Image: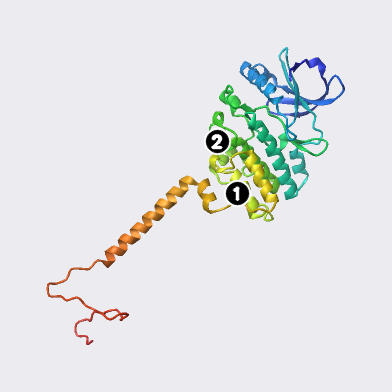
Amino acid sequence: MGPARASQYFIHRQIGEGGMSVVYVASDAHGNQVAVKRLKDEFASDPEFVKRFLQEAEIMGTLRHPHLAQAIDYVAAHGEFLLVEEFLSGGSLADRIGRGPILQQQALLWCRDALLGVDCAHQKGILHRDLKPGNLMFDAHGNIKVTDFGIAKVFGGPKLTRTRSEMGTPAYMSPEQIRTPQEAYHLTDVYSMGVVLYELLTRRVPFERSGDFDTKQAVVKETPPPPRLYNAEIPRDLERIVLKALEKDPNSRFGGCAEFAAQIDAYLQGRPFPSGGASWIRNHPRLTVVLVAGAVLIVLLMILSSAVRAAPGPRSATAKPITRPAFAPPHRETSPGETR
């Protein structure tokens, strides 16, 4: 994929706008419809961001997956920066959520396919960082595709400034993306897809407050409400899958989007989600250490207490040991004046 000239594309109309870009429907020189994303002026004038845009445009051109929007070309001329992609005429997942409830199986299939697309990007070293229903689009045949890698991060590439790297949609951002955005890695996309699945099943996100700051605070500090609280028809195994993706500790989530997708497949095939035992210990190593140490301490205290109660008290020099027959009732001391 090489740079194209802006004159090769005829802009028809605007169809969307994000934080950094405006999206248009356009035609190429052969009359084929394409989507053209134009970088907003405030970003186009930033040399650091332009460098990243050109780097990522080249990388996006190498991605080939049935569930990724295909990048076709880019324009970098006269202060204009455009990314040209295939035109997806089926609308967004956000549109479909807005129309009403979605069948669980369909929701799971869409999430699985999107996860496989994101995993392909991860394999090429690209982290999306803004996965949400609005960035999951459908083609004319109903296939879901991940789009809008506008704030993607290239693993090992140059870092963005803090202002740029903090971009995202608060309700779908992972706790680590909020706390240390420059250090977020591929498991942040696992979390975001967990939020998407949560929303598909409950028609709401786990955390959404009146403002961005309060929403971010909730994401970082609060426990996600169980999905069954809002939809009692969600099976418990499916609820556990969703909550695992939403773990605060990235290492307690699925190991990647491919593993998340595989677990959805396993669920669809009727295999139970592993819970308890080794799985719980693996996902909560620190808490396991604390609980084991506490249990050992309790056992030691019980042993010590028993030993103290069993120790013989002081006896006089003339006292003789008392012997009892087996299974005899316990000896009872008599009070003065009482006859045995």
Where disc 2 sits, the SS reads: helix
Whether residue 97 is situated above or below residue 303 in the rendered picture: above
Mark 2, other Cα within 10 Å: few <14 / some 14–19 / many ≥20:
many
Query: Could you tell me how far apart the alpha carbons at marks 2 and 1 are, in whole angstroms?
Result: 19 Å
Q: Amino acid at mark 1?
A: Pro
Q: Secondary structure at mark 1?
A: loop
Q: Is residue 307 above or below residue 330?
A: above
Q: Residue furthest top?
A: 78
The residue at the point 43 percent across, 49 percent down is 290
| Residue 152 image position (x, y, % from top left) | 64, 28
Q: Is residue 128 visible?
A: no
Percent x, y of residue 151: 65, 27
Q: Which residue is mark 1?
A: 225
Q: Image quarter for residue 300? A: bottom left
Q: Position of residue 197 (x, y in %)?
A: 67, 44
Q: Which residue is mark 2?
A: 176
Quadrant (top left, top right, bottom left, bottom right) of the C terminus: bottom left
